[in-house]
Image (spheres, rainbow, N blue to C red):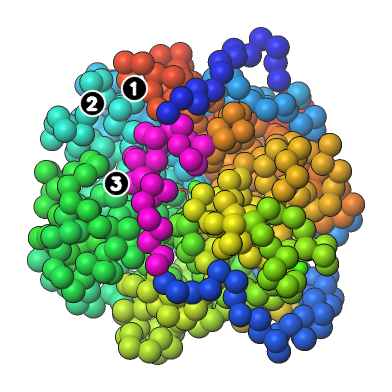
Amino acid sequence: MPDSAPRRSLPIIGQAGGGRSRATCRLRCGDACFHEAPNTSANPYFGDIFSAMVSRRNALRAGAVGAGATAGFAALGGLAAPASAKPGKGWGNPRLRFEGLPPGHSDAVEVPEGYEQEVVISWGDPVLPDAPEFDFDNQTPEAQAKQFGYNCDYVGFLPLDRGHGHGYGHGKGRGRGHRPKRALLYVNHEYTNENLMFRGYSDDTATEEQMRTAIEAHGGSVVEIERVGRSGRWKVAGGERRFNRRITGTTPFELTGPAAGDELLRTEADPSGTEVLGMLNNCSGGTTPWGTFLSGEENFNQYFVNADSAPEDVREKLARYGMRGGEEGRRWNRVDERFDLSKNPNEANRFGWVVEIDPTDPDAKPRKRTMLGRFKHEAANPRITEDGRVAVYMGDDERFDYMYKFVSTKRVRWGSARHNATLLDSGTLYVAKLSGNSPAEEFDGSGELPSDGAFDGVGEWMALCTDTESFVEGMSVAEVLVYTRIAADKAGATKMDRPEDFEPNPVTGKVYCALTNNSAREPGQADEPNPRGPNKHGHILEITEAGNDSGATEFTWDVPIVCGDPDDESTYFAGFDKSKVASISSPDNLTFDEHGNLWISTDGQGKLEINDALHAVPMHGKYKGELKTFATVPVGAECCGPLITEDQKTVFIAPQHPGDGGTAEDPQSTWPYGDFPRPSVVSIWHSRGKDIGS
Ligand code: FEO
Ligand code: CA
Ligand code: CA
């Protein structure tokens, strides 16, 4: 960390249980952690032991390891997602070769010695060619609809100069030696912090102009960027920028898949049930092997009011999705009646989906893929199955909610955008049920390792429905997809500690899920996959699919990382010497480098009184568990992104809500330009052109 870095202590006054300010809790999640958890199902906290599976556990394990080096690699050779590395270089003993940062307290992005960082684009910067320059005191919805939106989250990257559009043929002829000069950056704009956007703002006195501006500041951006020389540094591209696009809270979307057109999705304004205006609260996402971006609509519930006056028969379903109250929060119903559930109870059913965006076709309607189910989607990350279909892993970020997987019916066809655009509309939707292999009484919520030395066990992907058949009694296919949480309750899924991002490891094929935290888990509700109650700092779950095949319906699992201050006895870093690892709390978004090191961004390290950060940790070999801090983000921000380019020369992060908890008059951060906080995307590169982390 540079000695000259400005130091400001992290404001912890007014901080909420999640390590964020009350303002963020209200604006981002609709105060999810302050309400009763919406999952009131009787599903067990400790899944029933599948005795048959337990007896097969060792066999599965052995199979997985054997497959990892052979069949697993074949599958991964097909993946070649632009967001991650090409197939791994082998198992080996990867080690991160940078000096880990001390905990962050500054109002800046800090990076290790030898690295440099720079803002690529900030809230308000022009995206469309005719966008006006940003004017903080004269914001309009028309201007915002053409400018970079607020609170950037997921970052996707698609090289432009290795062939794009319909010829985009991932998995063929790509190599890290190729360094694209131009690329498309895709960024989600999860939500707005009106207190920081507008002087003197209050929900009660919000003007129509402010509300409409906030709606336009949601959504996503596609931005052409270009490399600076041969470095890992990227800047907004000059020239035509014909792919640049803003997607907002009013952009038309097509609903596709089995539930599209169902009466549950029809409204007075859209009797077809196939066209929705806008996407909301898009948190993280993923990049498909065929070159599109997936984006998860997360805490959409908070935008809807008057659930308590909705028709009697839908109130319980609304409540399962966190919609219970009268008028609260932003109350956009004042400018658009569709947000009023007493008048438009079906409108809420049109949010909470995974969206697929083709960034190479700026005129195409983005698609909400109903086959992937409806819940608070954090992200959606694909992996190719042994037989060439696509599996998509998804978490429902709610206390005590579930982990899901979709597996397509059709195979990916390399180079055929038209065919691949249909992949996410037919297949099977699964929810996870986990069982531990240690006696239940060994879990008292303290996080102490059980006597067999590992939090581990077996799991099953339970099919909820295909595109033509429901496996949930009393629910049609459309009902399973629209009320996926209720279907999963009935199936007896395992209640998890807020499943966030999923990510497959390009070297080993194992799949990882960030379980960010769960303030509400009682000690008596602790179980082997969620061993702490309360779970203040979260943990990482590792899944090994049977045969290392993402098409499998059985898996083994373990918990390699239990987060927190390493001095805290309840933490665990894969058995690595805890005196040599960094503190981490509330893991959120995940990515991998080509060596199989896991990169973890956090949302809630305020609980440790340190700024949020990007950490990295080897996930196999003798340095497994050696967690180091690679970047820290400004005061009040969470560290979204992260993304490592395929050539391993750049990391993108997206510090979200800097100055969280402050107001426009009294900002607690002035990052990045010294005046008022602006959520921004940042690139980080090695000053001498070395690979990131190596
Ligand atoms: Fe938007 Fe689950 O974090
Ligand atoms: Ca165990
Ligand atoms: Ca997140």
Residue 337's label in the rendered image is none
Q: Earlier in the sequence, mark 3 or mark 1?
A: 3
Query: Dot 1, crowdedness within 10 Å: few (<14), some or many (≥20)?
Result: many
Image spot of residue 182 (x, y percent): 55, 41
SS at mark 1 in the image? loop
Q: Give the position of the N terminus as an image quadrant.
A: top right
The answer to whether residue 159 shows anywhere in this view is no
Residue 649 shown left or right of residue 670 in the figure = right
Image spot of residue 478 (x, y percent): 31, 80
Residue 116 shown left or right of residue 428 in the figure = right
Give the residue type at disc 1: Thr
Residue beneath disc 1: 663
Q: Earlier in the sequence, mark 2 or mark 1?
A: 2
Give the residue type at disc 3: Thr
Tell me the residue at 49%/78% (across/down). 492
Q: Are marks 2 and 1 in contact (CB under 8 Å)?
A: yes
Residue 518 vertical position relative to residue 461 in the rendered view, above or below: above
Residue beneath disc 2: 201
Figure quadrant of residue 603: top right
Residue 449 shown left or right of residue 160 in the figure = right
The answer for how far apart the CA atoms under marks 2 and 1 are is 8 Å
Q: Are marks 3 and 1 in contact (CB under 8 Å)?
A: no
Residue range corresponding to the magenta coloring: 15-40
Q: Give the position of the C terminus as an image quadrant.
A: top right
Residue beneath disc 3: 248
Q: Earlier in the sequence, mark 2 or mark 3?
A: 2
SS at mark 2 in the image? loop
Figure quadrant of residue 392: bottom right
Q: Is 575 contained in the magenta span?
A: no
Q: Are marks 2 and 3 in contact (CB under 8 Å)?
A: no
Give the residue type at disc 2: Tyr
Tell me the residue at 46%/32% (across/down). 15
